[in-house]
Image (cartoon, helix red, strand yellow):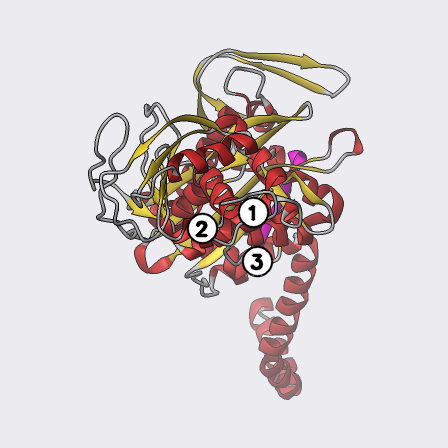
Amino acid sequence: MNKPLFYIKRFYVWYQLHRNRWAGRMVRFPIYLLIAYLIWAFVLASMISRALVLEVVLALMPKTKLDGVNILVVGVDGTNGIQRSDTIMVLHLDSSKNRVGVMSIPRDTRVNVAGIGPTKINHAYAFGGISLLKRTVMEFMNIPIDRYIRVNLTGVQHLVDQLGGVVVTVPKNMYYVDAAGDLYIELKKGKQVLNGDKSVQYLRFRHDQDSDLGRIHRQQGFVHSVANRIVELGDDANLPRIVTKLSQSFDSDLSTKELTGMVVQFRHALHAERIDMGTIPGSAILMEGVSFWKPDISQMDQSVDRVLLGLDVKQDMLMAKVKTADRSASTDERRTVTLKEANRVAQQTDLAVIKSKKAKDKVKVIKKQMVVEVLNGTGIPGQANQAAANLKKLGFKVSRTGNAGSFKYGNTLLVDWRNQVDSSVAMAHALGIDPSKIIVYNRPKKTIDATIVVGKDWGQLPRKAGVTP
């Protein structure tokens, strides 16, 4: 018998006997395949990192836009076990204008810290952590703080390495060694890609004539470079993956969607060239051997409105003329101090601390630096000389006395020539002058600091103890 034909017949008989059983198996085969696939997928998912799974999910999630939100950014230096907020910035996100405002606060800024008193702002973090620093910044800048981002030096190093480095132009050779402080800095001048370690060196350097202000300028430029690098790495679609990866380098009370939205807004602001940066205005002072950054509260409030919040606030202008020793003052760029401005100055300067003391003590803060002229605006003989004598007793330097251009001044005026609103408000407080009667100019080359025009209300002003009409 033909063997092939024999085996074909055998197979046909076997198939007829078992075809019902195989038919059932063939029906169940897709189910078995699906179960096997699910088991394989489960095993595979258990082998990959949770972060990768989260990235895939987040890529499909909507981004949360932050409009009108203020974010406190804190860079913490924990060297030698001491937690110090070496970097303090406030970001303002405005999605409607594709704009981001950035305001830096020098770490030596002298502020009133709840429960501590006047001290450096970085002490707020050292004594009370992020909550006390947040409260201090809110009271100091007179704005709400909605969220925070906190990063330490290790986090900065890790973040930059995750980005593959950032492009920075080092303005000059930087070299500094402090073995006790575990600080080693060696950077060459020029444009270059800094890795995490070199970035930390760049941010920590401040041993030059620019000191902390130079450091703040570098910090702001570094933030801009980091934002540029993140933009280079991807578009809006894959930013969630990048943010998830970078979020391991810092902690924040922003959700992942909010962080992603913030990065997207930075991206759009960069493209629109709408990132504005500034620093709290003021001057360096030395008090009892300790260096501080003394903020100019009036100028700060204007900078917060203009640079941080992007507002266009116009000041009230006073149109009255005041005749002075060198010339009559024009009305150009002249303004008056508002009640809000006066209250802010009083709250954030030494007036808030020594308000219960005598006026003679109050003016100690300002008398050494102010040169004053006194003009008679009433026509009553001797008014200017009498007022000048009292000012001299308080410690002010009176350059001259004389008559004003008019004898019709019903209210006493204080003209602040050099835009030193902190000092002029303190002086008005001591003399009982209404702060709204302070006229402010910005003339740094003026030979005097202030002019007092004695008005008809001079004898009835509510002066403090120690100051007589």
Q: What residue type is labelled 2?
A: Gly
* Residue at 33% from the left image edge and 36% from the top image edge: 375
* Residue at 56% from the left image edge and 72% from the top image edge: 5
Is 161 situated above or below 16? above
Q: Position of residue 376 (x, y in %)?
A: 33, 39
Residue behind mark 1: 348
Is residue 235 left or right of 334 when viewed as pictured?
Answer: right
Q: Which amino acid does label 1 sit on?
A: Gln
Q: Where is residue 267 in the image (x, y as percent from the top left)?
A: 38, 47
Q: What residue type is labelled 3?
A: Leu
Tell which of 450 and 208 is nearer to you. Answer: 450
Q: Nearer the viewer, mark 2 or mark 3?
A: 2
Circle 2 crowding by C-alpha within 10 Å: few under 14, some 14–19, many from 20: few
Residue behind mark 2: 459
* Residue at 21% from the left image edge and 42% from the top image edge: 331
Q: Position of residue 96 (x, y in %)?
A: 32, 60
Question: Residue 204's image quarter?
Answer: top right
Magenta segment boundaries in residue numbering: 148-154
Whether residue 149 appears in magenta in the rendering, the answer is yes
Quarter of the figure with the N terminus: bottom right
Circle 3 crowding by C-alpha within 10 Å: few under 14, some 14–19, many from 20: some
Residue behind mark 3: 254
Is 339 situated above or below 384? below
* Residue at 28% from the left image edge and 52% from the top image edge: 314
Q: Residue furthest right?
A: 81
Can residue 225 be seen here? The reply is no
Check disc 3 and report its element: helix, strand or loop: loop
Tell which of 210 and 15 is nearer to you. Answer: 210
Q: Where is residue 79 in the image (x, y as percent from the top left)?
A: 74, 30
